[in-house]
Each structure stands twice: as C-alpha cells, then as structure tokens.
Image: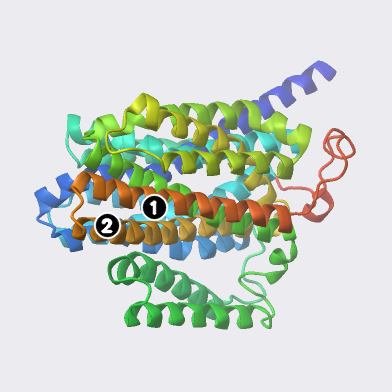
Amino acid sequence: MAEETGTEKTADDRSRWIALYVLCAGVLMIVLDATVVNVALPAIQEDLGFSQSSLAWVVNAYLIAFGGLLLLAGRLGDLISRRDVFLAGLVVFTAASLVCGFAQNQAMIVAARFVQGIGGAMTAAVVLGMIVTMFPEPREQAKAIGVYAFVASAGGSVGLLAGGILTQAISWHWIFFINVPIGILTGLLSMRLIARDRGPGFGHGADVLGALLITSSLMLGVYTIVEPAAKDGWGDPLTLGLAAGSLALLGAFVARESTVRNPLVPLRIFRSRNVSGANAIQALTVAGMFGLFFLGVLYLQEVLGYDALETGLAFLPTTLVMGTMSVRFAEPLIMRFGARRTLLPGLVLIALGLALFATVPVDGSYVADVLPPTVLLGFGVGVCFPALMTLAMSGATREDAGLASGLVNTTAQVGAAIGLAVLATLSATKTADLLAAGEPRPQALTGGYELSFWIAAGLVVAALVVALLVLEPEPPQGQEVEAGLDPHAERRGEPEPAYSEA
C-alpha cells in the first residue's frame, strides 16, 4: 500500500512539472512575440509599404492591448477560472498570429497585432498565479518560479535570435506562423494536464465600472508612452494632457475600489511591503533592461554592422548564463539566503553590466566590449528575477493569485514601455546634438547609446535603493528558510488543485 502511494505521488509530481513546462511554453510564445517582430520590421516595412512613423504601430498595437488588459485578465482568472482564461487567451493569440502571417496590408496586420495583444494578456496574466498554487511548498515553488523567471526574462533575447533566423531563412510571415502549432500543442496539453479551477464568480456583482476605469487608464498610459511621448517628448502638450487623463482614470479607479462592495482589485494586496516593493523594483529594473536590449541591438547593427542573425547570436551567451542561474542556482540560493538577500547582489550585477555597456567604443569588438557586460547581465538577471517573482507573489492569497500575477506582468510591461520611450528619446536627442556639432554618424550614435546605458544603470541603482529601504528584512538564517516553512502559508490557505495527472 505504501509502495502504491509512493508511486502515485511520483506520478503526481511528474504531472505538475510537465504542466509547468507547458505553461512556460505558452509564456515563451507570448514573450518571444514582443521582440521577434523587432528584427523583422525592415522586411515588414518593405513588403507592406509602411512609412517610418506608421511602422511603429506594428509594435505599439500589441503593446497597448497587452499592457492595458493584464491586470483585468489576472483578476478575471481569479473570479472565473485561471485555466479557462489561459486557454481562451491561447485561442485568441494563436488565431491572431495566423491572421498576422497572412496579412497583405497595413490595416490587417495592425488590427491582428492588437488582437494578439489581447490574447497575450489573457495568457500571460494568470500563469504565475497558477504556478504558486501548483507548487505551495517553498522549495518547489522557488524552483518553479526560477524556471518561469528564466522563460519570462530570457524570451526577449531568444526572440532576437529566432526573428533573425526566420526572417533571413524564410520570410517575416513565419515569425507569426510559428506560433500556430506551438499554440495548438500548448492548448491541448494544458487541457490534459491542468485541472479546471473554479473561482467565486460574480455572485456579489461584477465591478464593471472598475474594469473600464483600470483598462482605460492602462491603455491610455501605454499609448501615451509609446506614441506622443516617444515622438514629441514628455514636455509636449498632447503628452502631458494624455498622461494627466491616464492618471485621473487611475485615481478614479482607486477611489472606486476603496468603496465598492466587490472590488475588481482588492487594495489589500498593496499593504504588503514586499509585494509593493517588488513591483516597484521590477518596473525600474525592466525599464533599464528593456532599453538595453533595444538600444544594444541598434548599437550592434548601426555601429558595428551586425546583421539580424549575428545580433541574435550576440545575445545568446546572456540567455545561456541566465538560464543556468535561474533554473539551477536560483532555488538553492533563495532557500539558503532568502529572496531579499538573493535579490540584492543580482541588482548590483545588473547595474555593473549596464555601466560596463556604457563604455562601449565606436570600434568595439564583441569579445572585449560586448561579451563581458552581457555575461554580467546574465548572472544578475538569473538570480534577480526569480527572487523578485517570489517576493511579488509572497502576499497573494489563493483568491488573489491571478491578480498578483497580472500585477507583476503589468508593472513589467509599463516599466518596459516607459524605459524604452525615455531611453530611446534621450539617446536620439544626444545623437542629434552630436551630429549638429559635427561628429561623424558612428560616433554620434555611440554617444547617444552610451548616455542611455548610463541612465539605465541609474534606474537599476534606484531599484537597489528601493530594495534596501522598502523590502522587509528576512528572519535570521535557518529560522524559517531552512525549516522549509512558508511565511505566507496561513494567509494563502490550502491551495486548490491546479493540475491533473497525465
């Protein structure tokens, strides 16, 4: 009998880990899509006749829908079913990818990219919430979050490589077509491996007004960042007006949630210093990192003359180091030292890597000037982001896991959008000033990129300060972590089954 129970437990554990890999495959597909398109933009522009200004909408249409709906999608997962929201998102994303691949004109691809963003938000928003309920035991949870963090953080650099290969070897259409078989397979395996959870529903009424306010605020905010702010600057009257409108909608949403009986987003989740601090740290860190990936790609291509495939390969060591640290070492480090103590050196390494990247010369070589900072970044991100995810989910109850997951993704998305807009604008301004002063184009471009890399390093230093001042210090070593106790187990309650046997 004992042997039979042990066999069942082994099969049960195996099913959970397979389910985790299936969920991460869905996340990877979504994350890849955010960067894989960047490499293919010149080919899309030439094929569909985009102007330089209108080409940005191939990216922005996705970002606006994705960033605007993450919080709402996460909360809907809590209220209805996280698995159902995940599967519905996969269907929407996969179908929209097919339309993108067949696009023959500008309107078709921009509209399909917007729908892709909706599906991506539904899929990505609930995954982390599903993971923490599938793996309630601290050691397993830390390891599972490490796998998730690697996929979420390394997907961008993998996207650069995949985009380069597909665009050069076949055509830009295949950066979208490749999502179709992956989406179908992920959906089928998810239906088999992940049991359907049931939320409390809308028995106490649906906060429709709250949903409209937060979605409108986030969409308008992301639009403001990626359009008028990026093009005309932060001091432009239209930028300021739209930003004020977004903040006003956010204020109305907070006022609504503090008084309504059944809030869409219970504000109690922000009472935790670790949850609020981790999301602030993530926004700052991602702002610096996303700017690096975008401007680093431009440095390699515009200054050093790399093609799309060479650019993707240049970031491959970062991905390998990041994966090794996230999957192999993050869990034992978090269990040995705690999430906060693991996070701090990771932030230091990221800041050092960005600062080192800020010294790249015009005639830089890959081995001497590009490889060292990217490897440093791989080590930093590999230990930083799993710890950050652990802290961001630490205050979530079983009922709020989807909301906490959506919040993590929202702060990352908004941080990325703000970081890219600010760093790209400052870089372009600096480059223009240097060109006006008579500097050659390569020197002017490099000067602009260097300024942005220094600012990116400063953003990560600011994240480090927030970590030191806001995050709660961990108990003495060995008291809690080594005992295998979950400090939030009582608050979270007994987690619901989130998987089924294969």
Q: Quadrant of the N terminus?
A: top right
Q: Is 3 situated above or below 482?
A: above
At a point 21% along the width and 35% down the height, the residue shown is 305
**Residue 442 sits in quarter:** top left
Residue 465, compared with residue 322, is above or below; it is below
Q: Say which residue label 1 marks.
A: 451
Residue 156 lies, in percent from the top left, at 40, 41
Residue 290 visible to an observer of this rendering: yes
Q: Residues within 10 Å of mark 2 (few under 14, many from 20)?
A: many
Relative side of 45 to 74, left or right: left
Identified at 38% across, 72% down, the residue is 234
Q: How is the image coloured?
A: rainbow
Q: Which residue is mark 2?
A: 112
| Along the viewing direction, whichever of 129 and 409 lies nearer the viewer | 409
Mark 1 Cα shell of 10 Å, populated few (<14), some (14-19), many (≥20) = some
| Residue occupying the point 61% across, 30% down | 17
Which comes before the other along the chain, label 1 or label 2?
A: 2
Task: Left or right? Give the position of 455 relative to 277.
Answer: left
* For discs 1 and 2, the disc positioned in front in the rendered view: 1
Residue 264 pos. (x, y %) = 61, 71
Residue contact between numbered discs 1 and 2, judged by CB atoms under 8 Å: no
Left or right placement of residue 204 versus residue 191 in this view = right
* Amino acid type, mark 1: Leu
Tell me if residue 346 comes above or below residue 403 in the rendering: above
Per the rendering, the mark at residue 241 is: none
* Element type where label 1 sits in the image: helix
